Image: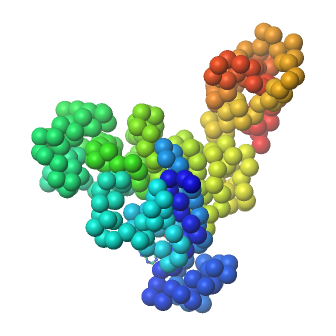
Amino acid sequence: MSYIEIKNIYKIFGPHPQKALTMAQNGENKDDILAKTGHTVGLQNVSLSIDQGETFVVMGLSGSGKSTLIRHLNRLIDPTAGEILFGGENILQMTTPRLNAFRRAKLGMVFQRFGLLPHRSVIENVAYGLKIQKTDKAERLKSARTWIERVGLAGYEDSFPDQLSGGMQQRVGLARALTTNPEVLLMDEAFSALDPLIRSDMQDELMKLQSELHKTIIFITHDLDEALKLGDRIAILKDGALMQVGRPEEIIMNPADDYVRAFTRDVNRSRVLRAKTLMQPTSTGNDTPANTTGWPEVDANMRLEDILPIAIACPDGISVVNRDHQKIGTLSKDQIIAALAA
Ligand SMILES: Nc1ncnc2c1ncn2[C@@H]1O[C@H](COP(=O)(O)OP(=O)(O)OP(=O)(O)O)[C@@H](O)[C@H]1O
Ligand SMILES: [Mg+2]
């Protein structure tokens, strides 16, 4: 069982959801259900398994149900039907004190509009979660200082939010979420309000932190490039229903339907596809053909954008090697061009 299990969640918005729920369970679509019942389908039979330490991205157009989904994970919203388990525990059955303790101990949240307390300094904002947990003052300030430094804001401890740029404010938001050492970070469009260069910096910062911290991150975005960059796996929602769940290269190489394909059309494929996705595997028991001698070697995880110059310089072919420098496959220039052109 995965760390987070979302099982057959339906969310119907409106005063008498039962009829609409039955219609949704019978597969009627969101528009018809709205027309016939006046109720909005927020989520339609969504099931997901999310592993500990995974960066799991949820994406989809506006109104597809992304925020509705993430709000179920901290129970800002309860489902009309379905179950949600964290580490085997059904969070829908938690009593209020248990739920509050669970939220404080396990969840950290980063919001699109930063959500900082305007009349408190950076360090007070970052230490706030520990204050709620009644951590002793010296200890919480020490911890806050560490995280402020970790997100690159050392020196700004006593500044106020309105004295910082958007990117800096979101660094504060990130530090605040991390200070309580949560297992899970919930990030709803956390970088969407930032301009492109700052946004890209924040993505890099998050990836760097994640490579050290190994949190379980649920990251919501409507931007496929962001999803592909950050996500170990990506779930794509449409009208409250899951269209596809997969690793970035799976989404790009095998989009499940036209909706997903439309998303992937403008993606820079060379940035997503890796040597291991495209290579011709060296079959076991069958020695590498002798003619690969002299071919350059690339790591299986190398992206096409970095392989391309090598392929141009060495038109015969490229050997793909694993971490132990064993040859596991080959790549030809034609294969690369075909993948980029698809
Ligand atoms: N509190 C609510 N009451 C009624 N309908 C709601 C409520 N919250 C969400 N909805 C509806 O549920 C659907 C999903 O909304 P949601 O906010 O989850 O979308 P989203 O994917 O987060 O969109 P965005 O990218 O614009 O943030 C929409 O049709 C929305 O109108
Ligand atoms: Mg939203």
Whether residue 107 sits left or right of residue 231 in the image: it is: left
Q: Relative to 32, is 86 above or below?
A: above
Closest to the observer: 85 or 291?
Answer: 85
Q: What is the image's colouring?
A: rainbow
Q: Position of residue 227 (x, y in %)?
A: 54, 48
Instruction: State which quadrant residue 338 falls in.
Output: top right
Q: Quadrant of the C terminus?
A: top right
User: Total marks drawn?
Assistant: 0
Residue farthest toward the top in the current orientation of the protein: 294
Q: Relative to 186, is 20 above or below?
A: below
Whether residue 28 sits left or right of residue 89 in the image: it is: right
Q: Position of residue 258 (x, y in %)?
A: 72, 60
Q: Which residue is at a point 31% across and 36% down the rendered structure image?
A: 151
Q: Position of residue 316 (x, y in %)?
A: 83, 17
Q: Relative to 10, is 127 above or below?
A: above
Q: Which residue is at a point 35% across and 48% down the rendered structure image?
A: 182
Whether residue 133 sits left or right of residue 227 in the image: it is: left
Q: Which residue is at a point 57% across and 54% down the rendered structure image?
A: 1
